[in-house]
Amino acid sequence: MILGFIFSHLNAIILGMWLGFFAVVLVRFLRPYWVKNISYKQLILVAAVLHLLYATFITWGQYYIWSTSSDFTRALLAAPLPIEAPLPVMLEWIRPYFGGTLGYFTYYAFGRFFLSVIILFVVTGIFYAIFKFWHARRNNFGIEGPELLCVLMLIAGWPGVVVLGPLGFAVAILFSVSALVLLKKTQTSLLPAFLVVTPIALIAAKPILDFLHLYALLKI
């Protein structure tokens, strides 16, 4: 009963979890003294662990469903990965690990549940390195600015991070122009813009990417 409810409402539960996590980050940014013992690096670690736990949970859920559904799905659990199954060239080295019992299921779970997490971590790491370099040269992110942006990218997830980047910079330009015209400020931070667009990227990434005809390309 409980598992059925969780699986039936999993997307809503995960969305609520990330919105709650974003609320913590927002409080950390706006009222740092309220949660002064929580650093952005700790929040990065928590976000990364949540992604891995989610992938692990739905892998277990998929295994449970296949093991209890039919003889056909139970046979899939025992099947090795067929040699004809495609793998990216850079991942061919892991093919032998799919050769035994649970080989096909491992391949399926890796491609459906873990590959997107790995891609998210790689993309986030690349952008984090770029932001750290930029911060070292320009020093306009604040003390923990790159770490905050890293947390926001992890909250946006995959493919939400693809929406977060361009949309965040677009809103930052809008904020910068508005500050220049209305307040005569010549320099503004990127952080408020990315905080504004993170919930949008989290909630509306699919329709935005669908509208741009990119979702099918980026969906894993």
Image: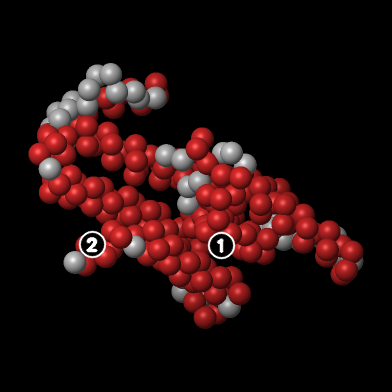
* x and y percentages locating residue 48 in the rendered image: 40, 54
Residue denoted by label 1 = 199
* x and y percentages locating residue 100 in the rendered image: 14, 28
- The disc at residue 48 is none
Identify the secondary structure beneath mark 2.
helix
Nearer to me, 22 or 211: 211
Q: In which quarter of the image is residue 13?
A: bottom left
Query: Where is the N terminus found, in terms of image quarters?
Result: bottom left
Q: Which residue is drawn at 27% across and 25% down?
A: 95
Against 220, residue 202 (above or below) is below
Against 14, residue 220 (above or below) is above
Residue reaching furthest bottom? 34
Colouring scheme, one of rainbow, by chain, secondary structure, one colour: secondary structure
* x and y percentages locating residue 166 in the rendered image: 66, 47
Q: Indicate the amino acid at tag 1.
A: Pro
Q: Which residue is drawn at 18% across and 44% down?
A: 66
Nearer to me, 185 or 156: 156
Query: Where is the C terminus found, in terms of image quarters?
Result: top left
Distance in Å between CA atoms under marks 2 and 1: 28 Å
Q: Which residue is drawn at 12% across and 49% down?
A: 68
Q: In this view, does 181 lie to the left or right of 80?
A: right
**Disc with the residue nearer the chain's start (2 vs 1):** 2
Count of residue discs: 2
Nearer to me, 27 or 133: 27
Q: Classify 10 Å Cα crowding around label 1: few (below 14), some (14-19), many (20 and above).
A: many
Q: Indicate the amino acid at tag 2.
A: Gly
Residue 135 in sight: no
Residue reaching furthest top? 84
Residue 103 in sight: yes
Q: Classify 10 Å Cα crowding around label 2: few (below 14), some (14-19), many (20 and above).
A: few
Residue denoted by label 2 = 4
Q: Do the residues labelled 2 and 1 touch (CB within 8 Å)?
A: no
